[in-house]
Amino acid sequence: MEFKDYYAILGIEHNATQDEVKRAYRKLARKYHPDINKAADAEQRFKEIGEAYEVLQDIEKRAAYDKFGTNWQAGEEFKPPPDWDTGFEFQGGGYTQADASQFSDFFESLFGGRSEFSHRESFEEHPSFYGRGQDLHAKIIISLEDSFHGSKQTLTLQRPSVDAHGHVFTSPHTLQVTIPKGVTEGQRIRLEGQGGSGRGKGANGDLYLEITLALHPYFTVDKRDLMLTLPITPWEAALGATVQVPTLGGTVELKIPPNAQTGKKMRLKGRGLCSAKVSGDQYVTLAIMTPRPKSSEDRELYRKMAEAMPFNPRRHLGVTA
């Protein structure tokens, strides 16, 4: 997927005001409109101009897009970094100028997932008008430990605005947030009254925080269940053993049955992400690790094992050695 330089497409500088964005779009849209321009590439250029305007005229999309800075050149191979838009507040989402089919894969990879949110509403400027503020949405990253135990955090989000000269800027929005115990990937926390300001005496909107779980060095997550690969020794697998296993709630003991094999899955009930109403489990997958022989004595021990316990694990494949 190629990176698109929306500023270059509109022929403007990165510090252009919102009025300059609008003027550049109108000029180019007239020039390349397919009803006027019969050049072979006019329709494609018209679509690119519309896509660039879709992003740069929207102060929230523009502020998030500007996060990439000038490190990327148009046409370079591009893949959005994971959770690149975490911490930005958005009012609405996907498509305000055209439908999804008119936008590139590049746009879709950045902003397509926000089309579920309601579009902006326009309010009439009148002293007696009362209007509820817009709901805002933002992604936040929390640790598995925060989800498992629940926590209270101070978060600083970025709220895009336009200054008196028409330039887009972001200002910090600091919040005290309670992370509920057992919250999962994709769930949203509603903060009442922390959204956009109301008009007149209208109430403020709400802020919805969408949860993203940070990668963990040991565990992977499947909805509410936690997955852990547990290394064990050949003798623990063969003879059975009681071993210690890490969980998010602390170390517990797990009884491994004799003759266990790599891939065997064992469940620790209730050790996953548990809320007040729903519980998750932790699943432990065994992986037999063979010690590396470091001396002649170690190698001799392996030879004696081979002689004393002849074993062909490939017999089911129809081979004899």
Image (spheres, rainbow, N blue to C red):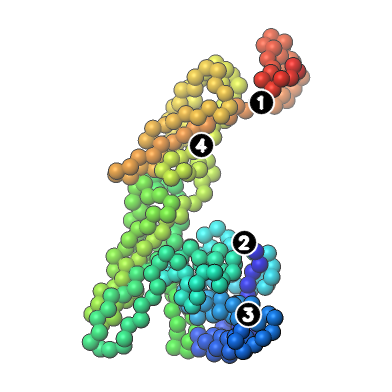
Q: Residue at x 71, y 20 (%)?
A: 318
Q: Secondary structure at mark 1?
A: loop
Looking at the picture, which amino acid does disc 4 mark? Answer: Leu
Mark 2 in CB contact with mark 1 (< 8 angstroms): no
Mark 3 or 1: in front is: 3
Sooner in the amino-acid sequence: mark 3 or mark 1? 3
Vertical order, 99 against 273 (above or below): below
Residue bearing the label numbered 2: 79
Looking at the picture, which amino acid does disc 2 mark? Answer: Lys
Q: Residue at x 65, y 82 (%)?
A: 42
View extreme (top): residue: 308
Residue bearing the label numbered 3: 43
Q: Secondary structure at mark 2?
A: loop
Residue bearing the label numbered 1: 291
Sooner in the amino-acid sequence: mark 4 or mark 1? 4
Q: Position of residue 148 (x, y in %)?
A: 39, 45
**Mark carried by residue 228:** 4
Mark 4 or 1: in front is: 4
Q: Residue at x 58, y 62 (%)?
A: 80
Quarter of the picture holding the C terminus: top right
Q: Secondary structure at mark 4?
A: strand
Q: CA distance from mark 4 to mark 1?
A: 21 Å
Mark 3 in CB contact with mark 1 (< 8 angstroms): no
Front residue of 181/283: it is: 283
